[in-house]
Image (spheres, helix red, strand yellow):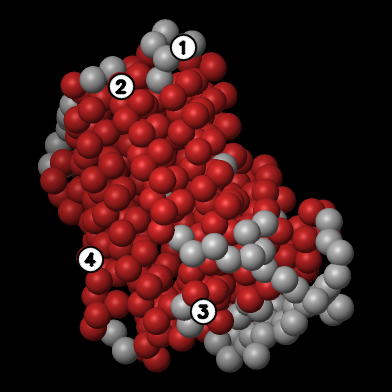
Amino acid sequence: MALTVLVYQRTSSPLLSALTFAIGHLPWLLGGPFLATIADRLPRHRVLIAADVARAVVLAGMAIPGTPLPVLLALLFLVSLCAPPFESARSALMADVLDGDRYAVATSLTNITLQLAQVVGFLAAGALVTVLSPSGALLIDAGTFVVSALWLWAGLKRRPAPVGDEGPRSVWRDTGAGLRLIGRSPRLVAIMGVLWVATLFTYASEGVAAPLVHELGSDATAAIGVLLSANPLGVTVGGLVIARLVAPDRRERLVVPLVVLSLTPLLAAGVFAVLTGPGTMPFAVVVALLFVSGLGSSWLIPLNVSFVRAVPAAFRGRAFGVAVSGLYGVQALGALAAGLVAEGVSASGVLALSGGVGLLAVAPALVAYRRTQTSVAGAPAGEGPSAA
């Protein structure tokens, strides 16, 4: 967020601001499935700790005052390279430790925690960028990774690397096996379609958060943090409701209506902002609609459980890597596309397009998801166990 604001202040370009926002996701698109294989080749606790240590070191380098902007963006890209192995190892390790409804509840709690962290992070970032320099904010960020690495080192049980029955493996073979596993399973393809298409359009407008806040009549940096925190706050509330009040056998049936709910408020907010004109629509109304969109975005929780049920244990790191690589990749592409469109239309117009086009684009994936609810995935022939 600090770099996104800095770029927009220097250039007044929605496209360059969106590019900065997208850089944090590009490593997933460029090398996510390849990097994610590390989670299935090494002990997962080592992958987690090493990734956090590496990010702390690079972020400390970014905090050096006077670092040129191109160098900062390059270092941001290096920080993001650590995310695919970390997230794949974390997701696979949770599935190894927990099963059944315990995993579903843990997934809900994890997503809620992550969303709360985003809410606090966006709000704190808006305040820190206002009070401190970007260097100070980045140094604090480096410190959080140090804390995480120490916590993981002290608290995680040491487990060996996962073992499959496919014999000696190479990184390229592991990557190919994960892709083939997904490609041969209509259920996984359907799940991935919902995940990627819905995410692409739901979060595309985050790439133009700075110009959107400006269009709504606010120049306060802290307002960007408030705008960006609305969706994760909604996901937090929605996740709590799903985890505590919805029976396990009903959660999967909520995916379709929740996806629709995540996109409709974007269309409404964008259309109303366009019709009322720049600086006319109350900022609080847009924030409230983004919060409702976040409530709908809690579809990620039951979808995640469906994904785990369809993937054999020995392939979870690779499968998660492919899924999350696409997830962050489409977020990067969405942010870039939003910035490009915002060069020609208003930021609120981008918001309306995200919701309207997204509803149309995700419909085929939702139909396939409903049609394949009784399907499961098996490992590629000769390359591992099949799902029970």
Circle 1: residue type: Thr
Label 4 vs 3, first from the N-terminus: 4
Relative to 377, is 154 above or below? above
Q: Which residue is mark 1?
A: 67
Q: Is residue 350 left or right of residue 180?
A: left
Relative to 334, is 71 above or below? above
Circle 2: residue type: Gly
Identified at 36% across, 64% down, the residue is: 110
Q: Is residue 1 left or right of residue 88?
A: left
From where the camera sits, is residue 181 visible? yes
Q: CA distance from mark 2 to mark 3?
A: 41 Å
The picture quadrant where one finds residue 313 is bottom right
Q: Which residue is mark 4?
A: 237
Q: Nearer the viewer, residue 189 or 168?
A: 168
Q: CA distance from mark 4 to mark 3?
A: 21 Å
Q: Which residue is mark 2?
A: 136
Circle 4: residue type: Val
Identified at 57% across, 24% down, the residue is: 74
Q: CA distance from mark 2 to mark 1?
A: 13 Å
